[in-house]
Amino acid sequence: MSHIRDRLHDSNTPTGVGLGLRAEFMAGVHEGLADDRVAFFEVSPENYMRRGGRSLRLFEGIAERSRLITHGLMMSLGSLEPLREPYFDDLRAFLARHGGAWHSDHLCFSTEQGAVLHDLLPLPLDEATALRVAGRIREAQDRLERPLAIENISYYLPVGQPQLSEAAFVNLVCEAADCGLLLDVNNVYVNSKNFGFDVHEMIAAYPIDRVVQLHVAGHTRWDRFEFYLDDHGSTAEPTVHELMRWVVERTGPVPVVLERDKKIPPLAELLDEVAALQASYDQALDARAAGRREEAARVG
């Protein structure tokens, strides 16, 4: 059994509820409107690598006053193409300045023949693919000179006939690569709605011992098609809070990120949602502590 959390988390690792940094409210964050209301910000290096101008200036100011966690968008770990050396050179330099104990990216492919597809596309859920991707994760970790955490994605059409459940696939990848897991509980929930599996059973089957971070977000139901879209365009549902609490009761303190990418409300409303999510997070830690006290009393 891996204890990767113990290896990756240190005194500099933020815990509690953070917010994914977005251009729509960067100016407010830079002005200090989120001070003492957010545990940290999650940033995507691709938004700032080889960039200049106002956005980079705002980011640099935020980075000076806030704790950060990095989360990538373009590594394309599931691609059949070689890992792109210039991209890793730029990313390694960014992480040297702003990175923490690990960097994360998605368990997907997002490039094809050099073209960036601007989407997170699913992989065949089979053993051969899992082992191939695990080898690429090990190579990526070597290139970055730091551990990776991979994120499970939402998807809408399986690639071929699945041989493994999504949890079994993630387990195999993580074990073979010896990497961490960024568990997006909303993604599992959306997939459960679209594909008809029990979300609680699936979450429980994930490698919880490898979870170093969580994502929480909202989604949209398309009533016309009886379909759920992971658009990060609404407030996270109570069930997503419940799933987050279930995981945190088992992991203990880890960073949890609220993501919002569509219909982004004013920063004050987002900060209220962060506070609500923090309350759920604190409930989970309280339940964990109570459970440990009960266990100690039984043993004693």
Image (spheres, grey):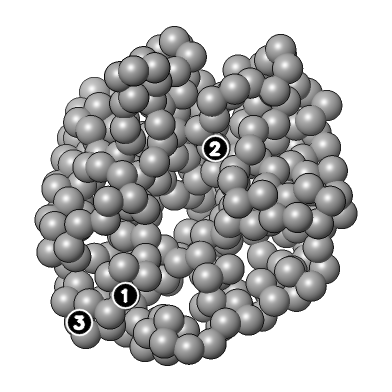
**Residue 229 visible to the viewer:** yes
| Residue type marked 1 | Met
- The image quadrant that residue 124 belongs to is top right
| Residue type marked 3 | Gly
Please, is residue 30 above or below residue 193 in the view?
below
Q: Position of residue 164 (x, y in %)?
A: 67, 16
Please, is residue 20 above or below residue 117 in the view?
below
Q: Which residue is mark 3?
A: 32
Q: Position of residue 223 (x, y in %)?
A: 30, 19
Q: Are marks 3 and 2 in contact (CB under 8 Å)?
A: no
In space, the residues marked 3 and 2 are separated at their CA atoms by 33 Å
| Residue type marked 2 | Asn
Instruction: Looking at the image, tell me whether mark 1 or mark 2 is earlier in sequence order.
Output: 1
Q: Secondary structure beneath disc 1?
A: helix
Q: Which residue is mark 2?
A: 152
Please, is residue 290 above or below residue 192 in the view?
below
Please, is residue 202 above or below residue 44 in the view?
above
With 274 as the anchor, is 75 left or right in this view? right
**Residue 258 visible to the viewer:** no
